[in-house]
Amino acid sequence: MAADIIVPTLGESVTTATIARWIKKAGSTVAADEAVVELETDKVTVEVNAPEAGVLSEIIAPEGAEVEVGALLGRISAAAAKPAGKPVEVKSAPATAPAASGVQTPQTPPGPVARPGVALPAAAKLMEEKHLSPADIGAGSAKDGRISKGDVLEFVNKPPVVPAPPAPKPPRVADAREERVKMTRLRKTIASRLKDAQNTAAMLTTFNEVDMSAIMALRSEYKDAFEKKHKGVRLGFSGFFVKAVVAGLAEFPAVNAEIDGDDIVYKHYVHMGIAVGGANGLVVPVIRDADQKTIAQIESEIAGFGKAAKDGTLKLEQLSGGTFSITNGGVYGSLMSTPILNPPQSAILGMHKIQERPVAINGKVEIRPMMYLAVSYDHRIIDGREAVSFLVRVKESLEDPRRLLLEI
């Protein structure tokens, strides 16, 4: 009686694997649940165990073959089934035999066969350390074209190929109706930082919407008393958004963190960047220790930033050190946008225009002042669950400002 060795389920979205090596050779005696063959996928390495004790009598899929989940790899014959004095007949699928169902077995010509993508264990470990893939190395020099450690070392130590300089760009033909103006240093810095964010971060954006009814009602009721008590400081929306973000960051600290080399730096404070339009472009001054400040203090600083940006009097120290940023495209009429990260920060919140829209409230259609919110984030450090949950937390705080007061 023979027992089949088959490819097990390999995990979500993984349907194929490559046979890295047969741990047991044809004719070997194996124990039940003993590892007999090693499979490699694009995510993990898996050992397949013997379904029962016996002799590995037949290898169907050779090393280097690509196999599907459920495919037949080999067979085990029960040791007790051997006739006395007669050796067990061991079969190994010939190289020219057609592949079994689910197994892609190429025809094998005489001589070594290149198997790009199959690396010896020492080579695989070194490739992982050097962040290389089998595709970088190509066919190796070991038996059957496998990649050896020496192949990896040769690739690593190979002098880099210096590309030829690009052909000079022909001069642009100017039109008499055009005007050429030199980019300001600020504009060049903005362009460089934004492009760096796109090139470096794994940037994604998630959206939600917030009903601004509660905030607008609260602001309408208390704005005069607020301004009188705080000596001319106006009660805007930004203070509420800063406090809502602070509450969200306390619950999801990865959104307030940054990547530094191979480390993640978690910030146990909030320096909130507030994007404001200036005479020479967008700038992001920082409210330091925003998590320790009142709405009145926050609104006062934001008003000061706006005036200084228009006057061109912002200082360098006011523009550095932020851990999270808020940008408000709504002041220019933007209904929805995907804000770009402000490196080295890992996330940014985008506010937008408040617009009355019909929404379903308790089974009825009502007109409510709605705002779309957007959070762009670096997926290298922030998972989608964290980003979405953070934005929901901000939404909940804005739709019920009492949550901010009660810190719930």
Image (cartoon, rainbow, N blue to C red):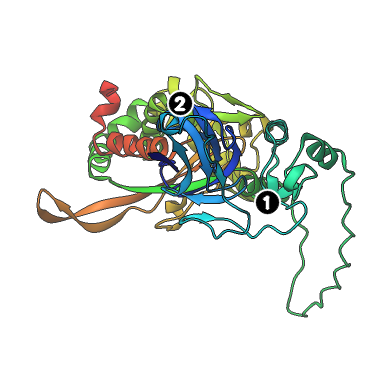
* Disc 2: which residue: 253
**Closer to us: 326 or 229:** 326
3D distance between C-alphas at marks 1 and 2: 28 Å
Q: Nearer the viewer, mark 1 or mark 2?
A: 2
Report which residue position mark 1 lands on.
191
| Residue type, mark 2 in image | Pro
Q: How many marks?
A: 2
Q: Residue at the bottom extreme?
A: 176
Residue 274 visible in the snapshot = no
Residue 331: give x, y in percent of width and height: 44, 52
Crowding at dot 1, Cα within 10 Å, few <14 / some 14-19 / many 20+, comes out as few
User: Helix or strand or loop: what does disc 2 sit on?
Assistant: helix
Residue appearing at x 77%, y 42% in the figure:
142
Mark 1: which secondary structure? Answer: helix
Task: Say few, some or many: other residues with alpha carbon within 10 Å of mark 2 (under 14 / 14 to 19 / 20 or more).
Answer: some
Residue at position x 22%, y 37% in the image: 221
Point out the image quarter for the N terminus: top left
In the image: residue 84, left or right of residue 143: left
Q: On the rendered image, what quadrant is the C terminus found in?
A: top left
Q: Quadrant of residue 126?
A: top right
Outermost residue toward the left in this view: 363
Residue 237, position in %: x, y?
36, 40
Instruction: Name the residue located 52 percent from the left edge and 28 percent from the top edge.
Output: 29
**Residue 302 image offset from top left, x and y in percent:** 49, 35
| Apparent side of residue 148 relative to residue 27 in the rendered image (left or right) | right
The answer, for residue 408, to whether it is visible in the render is: yes
Q: Is 83 displayed left or right of 18 in the figure? A: left
Which residue sits furthest front?
85
Left or right: 65, with 226 as reference point:
right
In the image, is residue 14 above or below residue 33?
below
Q: Position of residue 390 (x, y in %)?
A: 38, 35
